[in-house]
């Protein structure tokens, strides 16, 4: 489970407290408590009779285990609550209080991962397995069937690299504000040395990107690097400082770099005569409606680099660019 280290600590504390009062062998009670906790977290509904048969103990012993687990969680982990479900005649963790992922949430996240294709096949399979372990065996089989075709026909990206370790390394450099050096392979196949001040990591349309500023302040706007094209990454001891008022605002920047092109900030005014203004808004979060006349909208938006201009040109006759201003 994704939260397993924390949850295991909870279970181990429960075991330690329960061993003193257990009339049976401590290892038997330890196993029961761990198994109970895991199955409840995975969304199973458990009956005393079923558990008594499985553990080969009395229903009274099972009740004592459940009460001990319930009391401990009530005192230490308030977001978890073990309740008795009258409809099914068993115990479960209430949906409202459970912090673990629900089956439908696991399904949604799996779909996002499979559609975005950010990782090689082996890495993807491992991540999907961890997500599926969040739910009960029964629900897991349902989710597995729903995504089975996409898993079977999953096609990894051409670069085939596992960028997860690199992402973590870059994230540490961003957090610690350390100068970072690397070799960057451009479309021409040539590798160029770059020394930057890393600012953020973003994901867009299959790829992870590092957003950074040149260490020598060669440009006063952020530069975009595809992470899978970065090699020989070296995080230096040298740090850089950024005044609080000038700190990189990742959320605001994300609104203005939908197309992952580096360059100065552009302010574009254009008209749109199509029938789905919503789609334009989703693509351009900074979009503003200046006016509307006879079904034709006059709009403005901000974006870094020339990507927005290239995208607008692909929209056909429905879009007419009126003005482009830089800076």
Image (cartoon, helix red, strand yellow):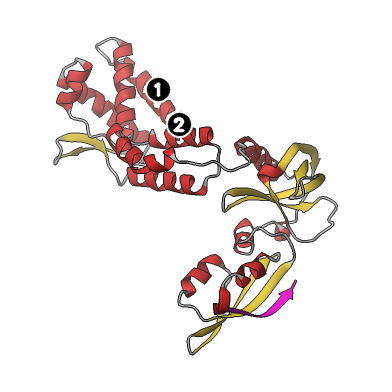
Residue 161 rendering spot, x and y as whole percentages: 62, 37
* Horizontal arrangement in the rendering, residue 311 relative to residue 229 (left or right): left
Q: Is residue 276 above or below residue 214?
A: below
The N terminus lies in quadrant: top left
Find disc 1 in the rendering and name its residue: 12
Q: Considering the numbered disc 2 on the image, is that residue within a helix, a strand or a loop?
A: helix
Residue 269 rendering spot, x and y as whole percentages: 64, 79
Dot placed on the residue nearer the N-terminal end, 1 or 2:
2
Name the dominant secondary structure of the magenta segment: strand
The question of residue 313 being in magenta is answered with no
Res 271 quadrant in image: bottom right
Q: Which residues are magenta?
A: 319-327
Residue toward you, 18 or 276: 276
Residue 268 is labelled as none
* Horizontal arrangement in the rendering, residue 76 relative to residue 197 (left or right): left
Q: Considering the numbered disc 1 on the image, is that residue within a helix, a strand or a loop?
A: helix
Q: Is residue 180 visible in this depiction of the protein?
A: no
Residue toward you, 106 or 8: 106
Q: Is residue 50 visible in this depiction of the protein?
A: yes
The question of residue 322 being in magenta is answered with yes
């Amino acid at each position: 489970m994704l939260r397993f280290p924390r949850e295991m600590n909870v279970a181990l504390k429960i075991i330690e407290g329960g061993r003193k009062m257990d009339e049976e062998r401590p290892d038997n009670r330890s196993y029961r408590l761990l198994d109970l906790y895991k199955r409840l977290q995975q969304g199973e509904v458990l009956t005393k009779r079923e558990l008594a048969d499985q553990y080969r103990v009395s229903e009274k012993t099972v009740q004592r285990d459940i009460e001990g687990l319930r009391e401990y969680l009530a005192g230490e982990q308030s977001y978890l609550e073990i309740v008795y479900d009258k409809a099914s005649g068993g115990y479960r963790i209430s949906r409202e209080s459970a912090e673990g992922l629900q089956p439908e949430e696991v399904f949604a996240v799996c779909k996002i991962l499979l559609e975005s294709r950010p990782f090689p096949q082996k890495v993807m399979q491992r991540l999907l397995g961890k997500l599926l372990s969040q739910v009960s065996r029964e629900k897991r089989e349902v989710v597995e069937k729903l995504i089975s075709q996409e898993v079977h026909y999953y096609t990894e990206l051409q670069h085939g690299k596992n960028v997860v370790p690199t992402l973590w390394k870059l994230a540490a450099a961003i957090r610690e504000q350390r100068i970072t050096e690397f070799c960057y392979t451009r479309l021409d196949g040539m590798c160029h040395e770059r020394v930057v001040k890393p600012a953020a990591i973003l994901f867009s349309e299959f790829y992870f990107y590092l957003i950074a500023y040149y260490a020598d302040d060669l440009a006063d706007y952020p530069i975009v690097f595809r992470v899978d094209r970065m090699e020989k990454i070296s995080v230096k001891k040298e740090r850089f400082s950024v005044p609080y008022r000038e700190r990189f605002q990742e959320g605001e920047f994300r609104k203005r770099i939908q197309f992952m092109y580096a360059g100065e900030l552009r302010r574009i005014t254009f008209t749109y005569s199509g029938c789905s203004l919503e789609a334009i808004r989703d693509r351009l979060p900074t979009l503003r409606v200046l006016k509307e006349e006879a079904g034709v909208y006059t709009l403005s938006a901000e974006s870094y680099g020339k990507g927005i201009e290239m995208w607008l040109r692909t929209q056909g006759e429905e879009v007419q660019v009126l003005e482009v201003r830089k800076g």
